[in-house]
Image (cartoon, rainbow, N blue to C red):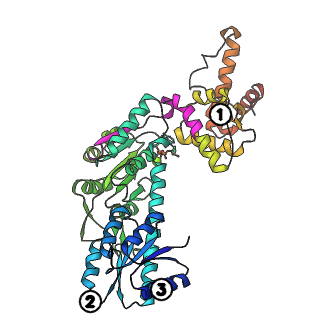
Amino acid sequence: MKTRILIVDDELDALELMQELFESKGYIPVTATNGLEALNIIRNQEPDLVLTDIRMPEMDGMQLLEVLNKEYPNIPVIMVTAHGTIETAVEAMKLGAKDYILKPLRLDEILAKIERITQLNSLIKENEYLLSKLQQTYDFTNMIGKTDKVQALFRLVKEVAATNTTVLIRGESGTGKELIANAIHYNSQRVKRPFVKINCGVLAESLLESELFGHVRGAFTGAIKDKIGRFEMANGGTLFLDEIGDISLNMQLKLLRVLQEGEFERVGGTETIKVDVRIIAATNKDLEKAMEEGTFRQDLYYRLNVIPIEVPPLRERVEDIKYLVYHFIEKFNKVYGKNIRDIEPQALSVLEKYNFPGNIRELENLIERIVVLDKTGMIRLTDLPGYIREYKKPGQPDNDSADLTQGLNKLVEDYERNLIIKALDQNNYNKFQTAKMLNMNRSTFMSKLKKYNIS
Ligand SMILES: Nc1ncnc2c1ncn2[C@@H]1O[C@H](COP(=O)(O)OP(=O)(O)OP(=O)(O)O)[C@@H](O)[C@H]1O
Ligand SMILES: [Mg+2]
């Protein structure tokens, strides 16, 4: 899109000069000879930038600037003024003009200033666009869950988002902890400031320390220049400390200090750095047990656990499975240009009986795979992998559907078959390992496979 520049000047010579200049450089110039005329044009079609003289009859440049500031704060304004009135230009900058140009006009100067401001403006627009996309992504409409438990959870998340307190999110792997951390940030007052994430579980202690706090040049071999850490990057915003249950006691102590005092030093540095950072931490570890065992500091626990948020595993919110399935169908239809319309009731009910050790992530990956491979526009029972179709609650024969008139032998056989399938699944379908795990010799195991028609 070409940039539209509105030039406002009562001196026709100047007006013409700039018009020609902008045209030759690929901009679209529009002209007005006073503020009122300019406003009329702007109301019809907003320009990307306004270049206005200060002294003009009718409405002068300062008055125009004032109106634009109120009504069109996103249109950048550059003031043009004759020698001797630089004070007015400075005044205009204070009132919100982006820049000023002195007469007599120098074409290269005008072009350079216009270029800088249009670039800046398109960056601002792009930034706003990206932010609005993120806000949409982490909008509560994309967080699925109708069960009372989850509805209560979402209400809590909304309330917490409006505050500035530290939050500790707990829950099994794949339950949505990170999604909730994002939702808190993007619905908080810190939304325009950075959301910085660090996975504390995957970094060795020394690396984690320099990632969190930064380091100064020469702090250790390989520290060839100063580096800022995540705490500084997140200043004014939110820092998400993922897998907080995995950090060493030593690092716990260092974290505690930042949380208490809001200050720290870079690794190898002496200068104390102060930051304003909101902390959201997450873990799937049993921190209470870790405290008992002495591997997690109590004081840090209380610092983090100001607002605890428990995310329930999927198997405790079975009613949500249906809604999640439809949500993911829609999502991956879009991503892969597919058109799955529905899921067979039998397939859905099998999903509702499965225990989902990987929680929502597992369900999401499953639906993604099915959508990618889909040929029929429908999710069918046969699209589901065997270990889900055959899944029975551990240690429990399928009593609900067991028809007792089949006789004990048949029922025991069914039970045995299911156990073997489960064991195979746990051993990645390696027969040798499975037989070993079940404490069966190889030939007995193979004959059972044959008997039960398991391939
Ligand atoms: N309520 C929900 N509605 C829709 N999608 C969800 C919901 N909760 C989680 N998801 C999706 O499930 C996936 C896993 O979520 P997330 O990464 O937040 O889990 P996690 O608890 O951080 O897992 P881990 O402990 O393994 O890091 C993500 O793709 C996320 O978008
Ligand atoms: Mg996570």
How many labels were placed on the picture?
Answer: 3
Of the pair 305 and 127, the residue shown nearer to us: 127
> Any atom of ligand 1 within 8 Å of the CB at mark 3?
no
Residue located at (47% from left, 85% from top)? 16
Question: Mark 1: few, some, or many residues within 10 Å (few <14, many ≥20)?
Answer: some
Q: Is residue 68 left or right of residue 395?
A: left
The magenta segment: 303-327
Name the residue: 38% across, 82% down. 10
What's the amino acid at mark 3? Glu
**Distance between the Cα atoms at labels 1 and 3?**
77 Å
- Give the mark toward the camera: 1 or 3: 3
Q: Which mark is residue 16?
A: 3
What residue sits 40% from the left and 63% below the top? 207
Q: Which residue is label 2 attached to?
A: 84
Secondary element type, mark 2: loop
Mark closer to the observer (2, 3) = 3
Q: Which residue is mark 1?
A: 387
Q: Is residue 291 magenta?
A: no
Asked if the stretch drawn in magenta spans residue 317, the answer is: yes
